[in-house]
Amino acid sequence: MHTKPDMRVTVAGVELCSPVIAASGTFGYGVEFEDIVSLNRIGALVVKGLSREPMVGNPSPRIIETPAGMMNAIGLQNIGVRAFVSDKLPRLRKAAGAAVIANVFGFTVDDCVAVIEVLNDAEGVAMYELNASCPNTKHGGMVFGTEPDALCDLVTRCRAASERSGRPLMVKLSPNVTSIAGMAKVAEESGAQALSLVNTFLALAIDVETRRPRIANFTGGLSGPAIRPIAVRMVHEAANAVSIPIVGMGGITRAEDAVEFMLAGATAVQVGTASYADPRAVENIANGLRKWCAGHEVSRVSELSGAMQR
């Protein structure tokens, strides 16, 4: 038995002490969890999506439980990138351990670039995660990540902006597409240095008594264990289509789920919805993965990536 397997992985040149990462939107700005989770036990944390200006989000109800998962339409509520840099990032810098990944979004390409430019001048960020699942308001609301030309323009310009700081750009892809492999290729060819997938699936839930949508926003994003087999399939397809690292996510609640994503081709994984049920889920899964590797005589966790047998 390997009592101390090597849990390090490298994503776009950034070395992580564990492949288990806290997903954006489920871990606040990181500082909220510093007394709950040992940040030196997880590989990284992705902060809540950051926009050019503060956003209040959607009206309630905006989060509901579903069979084997949940739906949300939070509306990307956040304090804005400047407040994050001044109020949250200094505390994160003092917290030893996990790398900080800044999730960036906007409703125009200019918005996304502006957020990156503010972050470029701040210390303590290891990488950017570009949310490509936002509607492009300049082009009729079409989601960036569902249209190849829009995704290409977004990634190209954001990569150019991120290069000033030397920080890698990871692109978070929408799963609501016909070919995830095709969109993965577009992102890679446009300059993405890593990909994260999948984001939530567009879903609708109706209250049969009131005959009204259960989410005030009408539709919401479905996440949790219900989507995991689809997410694993998409990670596998994307990993076979590109040569850059993949960070997989979608319904991970235990170490074995993380192993499944890595066998499908992921270099690392993100844990999201599980944190709502257990605030220490990310740390517990990271610890569980280390024990799983030791028990299965896996000396380096990186050996699991793409090791599915056919």
Image: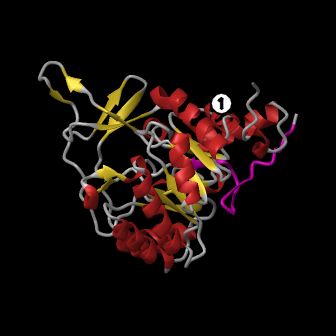
Q: Which residue does the numbered mark 1 point to in the structure image?
A: 256
x 41%, y 39%: residue: 176
Q: Is residue 163 magenta?
A: no
Q: Is residue 98 visible?
A: yes
Query: Left or right: 141 with respect to 3?
Result: left
The amino acid sitting under disc 1 is: Glu
Q: Is residue 103 visible?
A: no
Query: Left or right: 296 with respect to 117?
Result: right
State the image coordinates of residue 26 (x, y, percent, origin top left).
Answer: 43, 47
x 40%, y 71%: residue: 115
Q: Compare residues 104 and 153 and report the one nearer the observer.
A: 153
In the displayed orientation, state which residue is furthest to the front.
Answer: 149
Answer above or below: position of 161 versus 59.
below
State the image coordinates of residue 14 (x, y, percent, origin top left).
Answer: 67, 62
Q: How is the image coloured?
A: secondary structure
Span colored in magenta: 2-21
Disc count in the image?
1
State the image coordinates of residue 267 (x, y, percent, origin top left).
Answer: 68, 47
- The answer to which quarter of the image holds residue 87 is bottom left
Answer above or below: position of 41 versus 200.
below
- Viewport quadrant of the C terminus: top right
State the image coordinates of residue 258 (x, y, percent, origin top left).
Answer: 63, 36
Q: Is residue 17 magenta?
A: yes
- The answer to which quarter of the image holds residue 62 is top left
Answer above or below: position of 24 versus 104.
above
x 57%, y 31%: residue: 233
